[in-house]
Image: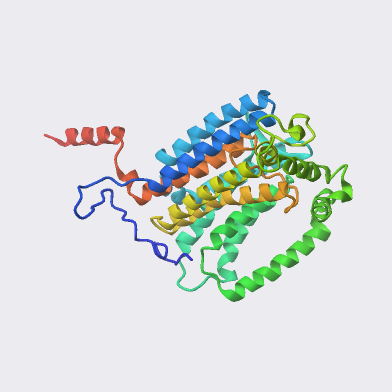
Amino acid sequence: MIEPKDQMVGVGAMAHAPVLLVPGQAIREPTLIWSKILMAVLFILISIGMVNLYSAASGTNLFWSQLKNLALACTAFYICGWIISPRFYNTYAYWIFGAVCVQLILVDIIGGISMGAQRWLKIGPIVFQPSELAKIAVSIVVAKYFYTSRLANPYTLRDLFPLAAVVGVAFVLIFAQPDLGTAGVCAMIMACQLSFIRINGKSLVLVAIGGFTVVLAAWFFILRDYQKLRVLNLINPDMDSSHTGYNALQSFIAIGSGKFLGKGFMAGTQTQLQFLPARHTDFIFAVFSEEHGFLGTTVLFVLFVTLIYMGIAIAKNGKDVFSSLLAVGMTGIIFVSFVINTAMVLGLFPVVGVPLPFFSYGGTAMIVFCSAMGILVSIERESLDLFRKASPFQRKAASGRQARRKP
């Protein structure tokens, strides 16, 4: 739980001074231990993901296009990790969220349509998906809300209503595209952050009852027929095996055929013979499972769990409530996307358009995932006061001002 104070419960074990003093040893600079492990795991995941995408796309232009996207994503990772301080997101949280909501409105009005969905916005030669950016925006605004409220008692529904209303705006705009998967991911990211907040027990019961009521209402009055079929196919994939259940069944075949060691790189029949649909996006995990089997899949799970653990470790040592909750939100982006995508491919969740982090093809998604990791690095750097060290440009400006003051 996060107490309504400037620090998380238990935070303080890590010193926040720029120089650490160890008895009996020389003065040493702080080390970004969690960030270093995070970056190592991130590099491994991206490398595996790009190799897997090459196989899924059979070496076509999709792979080379993703390489360009990766270059932009690495740039975003560096900017978010070393240039932009978490204080920036704290100061401009609502402006960032408002800018993303404006983009979502533009998508609903003039957005590009593909495969029956209106999700993309084109500005000159740049085409991107604002709903992916909403994941970061929601995380920032939730962290900002609890940073400014800081109630001494557990939060009630009345206390949480303004936050729910703000995040609900983004949810409705994304759902209207229609993109129930991404809208649900945004809600789950907020739920991850709320799980670290003290909430009144009665309010939790009311939320559970209200959530069940909303689900029933959505089933009868809001969800479209194809969305209902996705849920029903989860219970019985053979119900419509040639249409709505086709993706899930082909995914099962691909995963099962991989057995323990897999069929080998670019040797998966379901992938290379193109029986597996959306193999470079939603079902790319099935490609990996077919080629590398249970053993490779286990290694992949260990890597993602390690990445998520690093994010929680950084959140635990956050400098204040905002930094800690923001770290939880960034970790939640990876956690929720990974869990939903793998559960969907394994037949444990309805088929929705949620990409597998660092594996699925998509420029905006790759940039968002890498930006989230960069923000985690910046949070640990902020906790060690590394952002307070002046850059060379700042030192030059300071020395120039001092020179002008001399008589």
Coordinates of residue 314 in the picture (x, y in percent): 43, 52
Position of 67 compared to 144: left or right? right
Position of 165 compared to 373: left or right? right
Q: Nearer the viewer, residue 385 or 11?
A: 11
Identify the residue at image location x=17%, y=33%: 403
Q: Nearer the viewer, residue 131 or 289?
A: 289
Q: Is residue 297 visible?
A: yes
In the orientation shown, which residue stands out farthest toward the left? Answer: 407
Q: Is residue 69 above or below residue 41?
A: above
Q: Nearer the viewer, residue 372 or 110?
A: 372
Coordinates of residue 84 in the picture (x, y in percent): 42, 41
In the orientation shown, which residue stands out farthest toward the front? Answer: 260
Q: Nearer the viewer, residue 143 or 123?
A: 143
Coordinates of residue 249 in the picture (x, y in percent): 81, 44
Q: Is residue 214 above or below residue 401?
A: below
Identify the residue at image location x=63%, y=42%: 356
Quarter where residue 223 is shown: bottom right
Coordinates of residue 398 in the picture (x, y in percent): 24, 36
Q: Is residue 125 visible?
A: no
Render colour scheme: rainbow
In the orientation shown, which residue stands out farthest toward the bottom? Answer: 202
Position of 245 compared to 164: left or right? right
- Where, quadrant-wise, is the C terminus in this rendering? top left
